[in-house]
Image: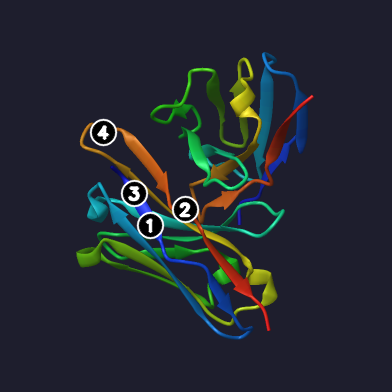
């Protein structure tokens, strides 16, 4: 099973700041990596698929990069609605999720 | 309007089974794949498995391999998750999610509202 490790576990930032979230895979997943945003009481929302493609309707402030084992989700300037938990998910083999990064208001 | 409507909350005794259904509308169900994901309170998202609607092919996470079954009814545009030998650790919100490329070659990913399954004696 491919293990995804996300860091940091918690990111404390202010609105307008840049957020950089990391996801590391225990073995190569090529570009088969997605990022989800999850808020309490809601279903997860797809932000990025295939490592760097923004899903329909996702604001341009969200961007994804990386390949093989190291991936990054960047939020260029945090809006109030961006404070949530973010998960990466690999989709190359028996999908798995990372442990999540909580982006909280500082 | 694309919608995934999941069945209602369930309360089950340990050792029994549960079925959660997911009815799709607003898109071509046969061209999609359905993944099932759960989240226990305070825990991470956990992938259970997926089913390709057209072929019925399934892949399950190793953890659930022995006690999960995913099926689909194309005529009813419905996917179903069955989990057996329930224990308290299976108490969680269960989500279905579909993914597919539409006629404009755009990638789509849509989730149901979630179904709370509580396992308690």
- Between A28 and A43, the residue placed more toward the observer is A43
Q: Which mark is residue B3?
A: 3
Q: Residue at x 65, y 46 (%)?
A: A98
The mark lying in front, picked from 3 and 4, is: 3
User: In the structure shown, which secondary structural element does the residue marked by tag 1 occupy?
Assistant: strand
Q: Which residue is mark 1?
A: B5
Label 2: chain? B
Q: Residue at x 52, y 47 (%)?
A: A43
Q: Residues within 10 Å of mark 4 (few under 14, many from 20)?
A: few
Of the 4 image quadrants, the one containing the C terminus of chain B is: bottom right
Q: Residue at x 63, y 70 (%)?
A: B90
- Between B11 and A66, the residue placed more toward the observer is B11
Relative vertical location of residue A71 with respect to residue B87 in this rendering, above or below: above
User: In the structure shown, which secondary structural element does the residue marked by tag 4 occupy?
Assistant: loop
Q: Which residue is mark 4?
A: B105
Q: State how far apart marks 1 and 4 are (Cα).
A: 24 Å
Q: CB of mark 1 within 8 Å of CB of mark 2?
A: yes
User: In the structure shown, which secondary structural element does the residue marked by tag 2 occupy?
Assistant: loop
The mark lying in front, picked from 2 and 4, is: 2
- Left or right placement of residue A66 versus residue B58 in this view: right
Label 1: chain? B
Is disc 2 in the same subunit as disc 3? yes
Q: State how far apart marks 1 and 3 are (Cα).
A: 6 Å
Relative vertical location of residue B53 with respect to residue A87 in this rendering, above or below: below
Q: Which residue is mark 2?
A: B113
Q: CB of mark 1 within 8 Å of CB of mark 3?
A: yes
The mark lying in front, picked from 1 and 4, is: 1
């Amino acid at each position: 099973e491919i293990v995804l490790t996300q860091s940091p576990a918690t990111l404390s930032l202010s609105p307008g700041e840049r957020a950089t979230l990391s996801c590391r895979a225990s073995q190569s997943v090529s570009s088969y990596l997605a990022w989800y945003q999850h808020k309490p009481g809601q279903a997860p929302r797809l932000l990025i698929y295939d490592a760097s493609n923004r899903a329909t309707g996702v604001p341009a402030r969200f961007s994804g990069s990386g390949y093989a084992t190291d991936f990054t989700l960047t939020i260029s300037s945090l809006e109030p609605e961006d404070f949530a938990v973010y998960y990466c998910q690999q989709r190359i083999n028996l999908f798995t999720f990372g442990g999540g990064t909580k982006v909280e208001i500082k | 309007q694309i919608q995934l409507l999941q069945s209602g909350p369930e309360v089950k005794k340990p050792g029994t089974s549960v079925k959660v259904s997911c009815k799709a509308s607003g898109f071509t169900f046969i061209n999609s794949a359905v993944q099932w994901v759960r989240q226990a309170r305070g825990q991470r998202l956990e992938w259970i498995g997926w089913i390709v609607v057209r072929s019925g092919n399934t892949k399950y996470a190793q953890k659930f391999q022995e006690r999960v079954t995913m099926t689909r009814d194309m005529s009813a545009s419905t996917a179903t998750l069955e989990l057996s030998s329930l224990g308290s650790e299976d108490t969680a919100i269960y989500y279905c999610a579909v993914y597919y490329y539409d006629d404009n070659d755009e990638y789509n990913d849509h989730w149901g509202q979630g179904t709370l399954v509580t396992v308690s004696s």
